[in-house]
Image (cartoon, rainbow, N blue to C red):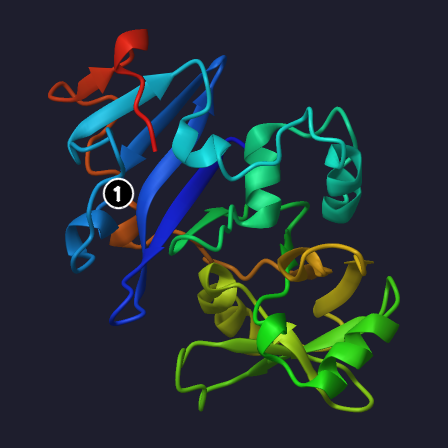
Amino acid sequence: MTKLFIAWQNPETREWRPVGQLTRHGNRYRFVYTKGATKARDFVPFGRMDDLNTIYESIELFPLFANRLLPKNRAEYHEYLEWLNIPKGKDEPLALLSRTGGIRGTDSLMVFGCPEPMDGKYVVHFFCHGISHLSQEALQIIEKLEVGTRLYLMLDVQNSFDRMAVALRTEQPKVIVGYVPRYFSGDFSKLLKGATQETLTVLVEAINREAPIQLRLLCQTSADWPKGFRPCSGTDFKPIVNSGGAERKLKRNTAELPGS
């Protein structure tokens, strides 16, 4: 994983927009704002990265993102990797951020990778969202799920908080056990059109009964990659400043490394 997007939610309108892009080039990290930041109502740039028209570079992961990862010196780090189903040696920061979504309870930001074709397939791993808002019955069913159990996608068009919401349910009994992360709901809605049980599957990848609720239920989705399908291709995802453009401004001096 070499490219991630960061989405921001307006606390009043609850609208989500991609506002930035994080990439890694060799031993350097690069952050740029995307055009979604110019459209997001009341959006304020992050900390010292206060210029929408600047390319920021650092040999260290920017604090805005590093603060969303569990430090490797923590005693529970090995267990953390098990929850994410990422083997040691593959625990590169962008891979960890992509798997967890970089979610913290103190802000309205999410981090996600843009899916790429894998042997003609759309394959993504994600933790179910919204589990803390489910009924006690649903929580008990989640506890009984096993790795490999198939789940089913369901458009939740009457969801008052998110008209694009895509729910996940069990087969029997038919109970919602979580939601697809908002940053994937648009893709999933498109994939559901014309899909069959053979061409689109969602399987339980891990049940982490001792993990925090946001890392409880890990799923994997696999679907045929539709012809002409291009995720993360809207205007909001385009960088404001082209990294190859003549007018770009670049901050890479160690004294100017931006904070969160």
Residue placed under numbered mark 1 in the picture? 34
Q: Residues within 10 Å of mark 1 (few under 14, many from 20)?
A: many
State the image quarter where residue 89 is shown: top right
Q: Nearer the viewer, residue 241 or 78?
A: 78
* 21 sits to left or right of 209: left
Q: Quadrant of residue 192?
A: bottom right
Q: Residue at x 79, y 40 (%)?
A: 79
Give coordinates of residue 107: x percent, y percent. 39, 53
Q: Is residue 28 above or below residue 102?
A: above
Q: Quadrant of the N terminus?
A: top right
Observer-nearest of 11 and 175: 11
Residue drawn at the location 48% of the way across and 76% of the way down: 165
Q: Quadrant of the C terminus?
A: top left
Closer to the camera in the image, 212 or 27: 212
Q: Residue at x 16, y 22 (%)?
A: 248
- Which percent across, then down, holds residue 259? 33, 27
Q: Is residue 160 above or below residue 70?
A: below
At label 1, which amino acid type do we have?
Thr
Asked whether, in this view, residue 146 is left or right of residue 79, the answer is right
| Local secondary structure at mark 1 | loop
